[in-house]
Amino acid sequence: MTDAEELFRSVLGTTGVVLSKEGEARRAAMRTQLTQVVVRQRRVRAAVRTAVSLTVALGLLLAWLAHREEDPHAKVEIVHDQPGMVALVRALPPRTVTIERIGDDQLVDLLASTEHPAGLVRLPGKLLLAPHAGFDTD
């Protein structure tokens, strides 16, 4: 006897309901249909949860990509089969880059000397440059 039959008998008492063979067959068919519906609903809910999760993740990724800070001095150009490109790049004079480490105070002083006064804002794990907006604090 299954749990459903036990529950059915406990609700109706010990006498229960006696069904004909056709009634028992119909009950079994209804139980099979109901089980199929429940399983289908569970699968649909799981698929919807997965689709919503993926959509939110994709939306967050696209928003992050759209709001990334890009270097205004960086220029990317894709060149496909342009004749003479290698010769052009080889003809350019070599560039040397010198990197000098300076402190916070030196950076603020350098920016002020170029007429671009700014301040530094420290956040956990970040240091932001806050350009001076030209507001008088007096």
Image (cartoon, grey):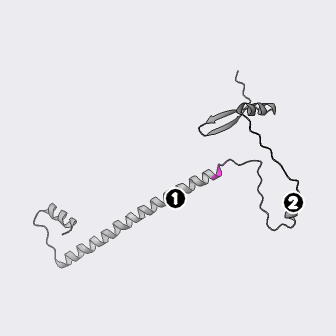
Residue 23, picture quadrant: bottom left
**In the displayed structure image, the side of residue 76 where residue 19 appears, left or right:** left
Front one among 104 and 55: 104
User: So how many labels did they put on this image?
Assistant: 2
Say which residue label 1 marks: 54
Q: Residue at x 10, y 66 (%)?
A: 15
- What segment carries the magenta color? 65-71
Farthest-out residue, bottom: 21
The residue type indicated by label 1 comes to Leu
Instruction: Measure the alpha-carbon separation of dots 2 and 1.
Output: 47 Å
* x 77%, y 53%: residue: 75
Q: Quadrant of the N terminus?
A: bottom left
Check contact, mark 2 vs mark 1: CB within 8 A. Answer: no
Circle 2 — which element? helix
Residue 90's disc is 2
Decide: few, some or many residues near mark 1? Use Cα within 10 Å; few <14, some 14-19, many ≥20.
Answer: few
